[in-house]
Image (cartoon, rainbow, N blue to C red):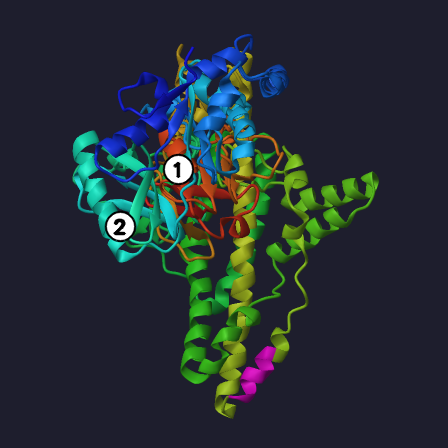
Amino acid sequence: MSFFADLHDTDARLGGKARSLARLSAAGLRTPVGFVITDELFRAIGHSLALPERIDDGALAALDRVRADLMAAAFPSGFSQELAGRLALGGLWSVRSSFASEDIAGSLGAGVYESRVAVRPDEVETAIRQVLASALSAGAVAYALAHGLRPAAAPLAVLLHPFVGGEAEGGAACVAECRDDPIIQVRAGTLSGVAATQLRGAMRSLVQRHGAVEVEWVAQGETVVFLQMRPFAPPPAPAPWRGWDDLELGESRDPWKWDQAHNPLPLSPVHAGLIALVDQRCRIGIRQRVLGQYLFYAPDTRPGPAPVAVEEAPARFADLRAEVGSRLAALGDEPALEGALDLLLAIEEPIFGIIQPALRLARANLQEFVRREAPSAAPALRQLLGGVASMASERRRRAAELWAARDVQARARARDRYLDLFGDETPVWDVAVPTCHEAPEILNNAETSGFNVPPAETHEQTGEQVEKQLAPEQQEEWRRLLQLARQAAGLAEDDDWLYARVQAALRRALLSLGRRLHRIGALSEVGAVFFLPLPLARLLAAGTAPPADLAMRAAAGRAGWEAACREPPPAREAPDTVSVKGVGTGGRALGRVALHRPGSPCPAPGQILLAATLLPSELPLLVAAALVTETGGPLDHVASQARERHLPAVVGAAGACRLFRDGDVVLVDADRGLVVRLG
């Protein structure tokens, strides 16, 4: 039985890394001189090891025992003596995995298996065991099973060569389409210009002979030493977003902007129908359209209602609030669908087409006055408009009371007080989403820090300081504009609260319809009503007999919504306070952030896993919609494995863990290497 082999690119016993080293040498490139411990060693000391066919809690314990047995197994007779002879040259050694999958495109196992560098000769035997045992780690077994491979498949070889140090080290990749511009990643040190030129030339030569490849290298002065070559899977070309197909034939995309700030998630079919109805019936200054089930907006060139004067906005809103309260009371607890729709359509133009333009004008007038008469006060505008009594400030007060409660009874009272005024609100502007009344656990999931009562504002003192800078004839105008702008700031918060009450009534009407359809067996569940088209829901509410395939139509609507969650629109560039840049692996995903902490459970499917760094051995065990890491580059292990799994990932996104928090809705645009917080 032969436990050792020299490097030759046609020897199947060598495994991936060792065979690639032989190929690099055959191409005339400088490589370390080494040898291989063949698969026969693993079969000799691990012949009785039983490996699991799936990963579960029992398998993890079994793998721990298997690795312990392997580490304790005696080497075959004569092995240690021959190894010592080959190590007689002295110095430090690199002991690296060279397994079956490490040369197969699509299942390279980047970083999954163990490699040890700078190993003393007396530690090499232990390092060999550790490398072989790495094939039996939970991550390695999960990786193999996910790729349809047998765990610890032959050859399970170990590559040994003298340790290669240098002034710089990194990776490089090249595909046929970019022979003149290879990707060069310097992970440590500084690469000299001569060495960089040598590396680029070598990559152009390798891609002609082997196709798309990536390599690991070390630079010793102006000489590059190559340590590994493997097939390279570049990021896929960005796929066109199919939501644009919803535009009319010949219609330009240019005016349409995704409302990622306010409505970042796809809309349910019934809410998409509501958007279409509002756009048809109301003039609110913008057009709205649902594309790919996401909300888009564009300027409206149609004539609209005349906005109210700035001074009249508070009284106009008070009248509207009283009217809404009266009509909601008349609708009752289970409103008729048409009555709830009529009320919502009745408030759209007054809020968004008449009152809101006046509120924006009040702020603009104050800003223009400051720009013209007191430019030094511009940085204080935010403080001047803060601390206004509004539904937003009341919401914060009541939420702070909830979190300050120390016992069950006090917390229940504070929760009821919060729900009494804000129970009709939802975390997402979609009629399909339960309100706080329906799902009070929403309050339990919020973070205390999000509900802090703001400190007392000093807008009076700041306003007086600005006033002192003005001429006497300007001071009265300043006080008038400031008062109007502060009133507008409060009303701008209050209209959201009012709209939420009306939307909650519409939701109750749809739930009432859903319960009726569920009772007669037309829908499999009450909530399926939100996945019907709104025109169909209106017909059913009016008494039309449900079609035989109603449940199938609702299921198709849900499936379309779920598909839209996986296919978000491309991201728009955003300020640095809501986005980070990195290097992407291709693809897009949208979901809620799950911060990764050592020892923490895997995120739920559909979440975005955010980590400072990830171990390659962790990746096969993770289920996520996308990955974001603060460290790493395009040729590192996380990016390589993400490309293999067709998993959108952005690596090297420095600052992401500081910017994003658990539960944030983010878009991972791995086509552009951009992560954007939405909403």
- Amino acid type at circle 1 is Ala
On screen, 81 above or below 480? Answer: above
Q: Locate residue 573, reporting x and y percent.
A: 36, 53
Magenta segment range? Answer: 462-469
Bin the neighbour count of mark 2 within 10 Å (Cα to Cα): few under 14, some 14-19, many 20 and up.
few
Splitting the image into 4 quarters, where does residue 49 fall?
A: top right
On screen, residue 337 versus residue 235, left or right, reads right
Identify the residue shown where x is 27% and y is 24%. Answer: 9
Q: Is mark 2 on a helix, strand or loop?
A: loop
Identify the residue shown where x is 58% and y is 51%. Answer: 322
- Amino acid type at circle 2 is Pro
Magenta span contains residue 464: yes
Q: In which quarter of the image is the N terminus?
A: top left
Instruction: Name the residue nearer the viewer: 509 or 110.
Output: 110
Identify the residue shown where x is 50% and y is 88%. Answer: 470
Q: Earlier in the sequence, mark 2 or mark 1?
A: 2
- Per the image, the residue denoted by label 2 is 255
Q: Locate residue 11, reporting x and y percent.
A: 30, 19
Q: Locate residue 258, reporting x and y percent.
A: 35, 46
Q: How far apart are marks 2 and 1 (CA)?
A: 35 Å
Q: Is mark 1 on a helix, strand or loop?
A: helix
Q: Can residue 595 be seen in this view?
A: yes
- Per the image, the residue denoted by label 1 is 639
Instruction: Name the residue nearer the viewer: 287 or 555.
Output: 555
Q: Locate residue 195, reporting x and y percent.
A: 27, 52
Q: Is the magenta stretch mostly helix, strand or loop?
A: helix
Q: Which residue lies furthest to the top in this view?
A: 48
